[in-house]
Amino acid sequence: MPKKIGALLAAGALALAALTAATPSAAADGPECDHYRHCYGIANYHGATNIDNVAVDLWTDCLHLETPDTDLATHELWMWTNTAPPAITWIEGGYIRGIHAGGDSDRWYRWFWAEYDGSTFSSHMIRHAYVGEWQQLWFTHYSNDKWGIYLGGQFAGQTAQSATVGTFVQVGGETTEPEVYSRGKSRNLQWHPQGGPWLAGGAGDATATAGVYTSSSTAADSGMAQNSLKKICAPAPTAQQAPATPPTQAELKDFARDFAARNGDKTDVEVEIVSTKRQAAADLSGSKATVDDDQAPVHVIQMRGDFVGHMATAPKGAPTPRGNTITLTIDAATGEVTDWSLGNQSRDLTKLGAVKSL
């Protein structure tokens, strides 16, 4: 069982990775990202090795995308596992907007976590997020070498991968869209080495992609500012939203094939679908992660093709996940993507129920 953090994250700890709005600048700066190449604004934290636990408080005031159905943006925490950077395996989590919320993605912000175990990438939504709220995100090492993900002190998931230690930590933002407009903060970065006490994270060299983010670093604070073509922030989501419309099979087919195309395969890929519960889908998907709820019904869509994970979140410099199988889990009532994975092993969906071809 995880150790309790409680007062270990004291209010007096270092304020880190403050993400603040910058003066808009033209894309003529030559941003190094487009719809499939990721841009980063990062504060690097040095000295954190042999990590047994890591936690940080995250806050977001604005996260706007011009094309939320085809792009993504995050404010998040990354942790490499077992290997030093560039990352081969990793765990990450935080605040996300974009394609992960399905066909009505502009209406929602989400908290999420994701991992890559060297062969399979998987991403999992935790719950809806709202602007202007501080939440603590915590990765903790279990005795079986799995890692638990906690948000606001509540269990959010357990990794499929086994990793004896975390090796490097970063906090910052990631986007596939140069016109993103974002503003957020992080504070109270703490890490716990195996056999040692809790320590405050130290600020290191800040890095950013030219033309999209700028960064700065001091002994006490590291931050990044985001440049944008438009100073726009979409209205803050509220808990009282109009009910979403359940997606039709035709809409699910279109979404699946569009998702396949955004991940490198624009052919007429094979699409299979079955209805089940969320944890059963995770158990079969190849991620084998533990998710935080077992909602039902969900649609599980599996596609086989030649995929490059352009829409997979990842630490800066990490290899892009690749594989021949994408699995999507979609809330049948709202159309939101709750989980997705990319790897090289297709699954027998008949174990979940009656399978249809779309």
Image (tube, rainbow, N blue to C red):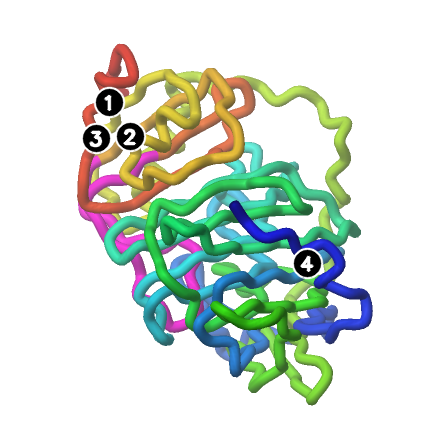
User: Label 3 near label 1: C-beta < 8 Å?
Assistant: yes
Q: Which residue is mark 1?
A: 349
Q: Nearer the viewer, residue 289 or 234?
A: 289
User: Label 2 near label 1: C-beta < 8 Å?
Assistant: yes
| CA neighbours of label 1 inside 10 A, class few (<14), some (14 to 19), many (20+) | many
Q: Which residues are magenta?
A: 304-327
User: Label 3 near label 2: C-beta < 8 Å?
Assistant: yes
Q: Please, what is the three-letter code of the amino acid marked with disc 2?
A: Leu
C-alpha separation, residue under disc 4 versus residue under disc 2: 32 Å
Assign the C terminus to one quadrant of the image. Answer: top left
C-alpha separation, residue under disc 1 versus residue under disc 3: 6 Å
C-alpha separation, residue under disc 1 versus residue under disc 4: 37 Å
Residue 345: x, y in percent?
18, 40
- At 66% from the left edge and 56% from the top edge, which residue is drawn? 5
Q: Please, what is the three-letter code of the amino acid marked with disc 3?
A: Arg
C-alpha separation, residue under disc 1 versus residue under disc 2: 8 Å
Q: Earlier in the sequence, mark 2 or mark 3?
A: 2
Q: Which residue is mark 3?
A: 347
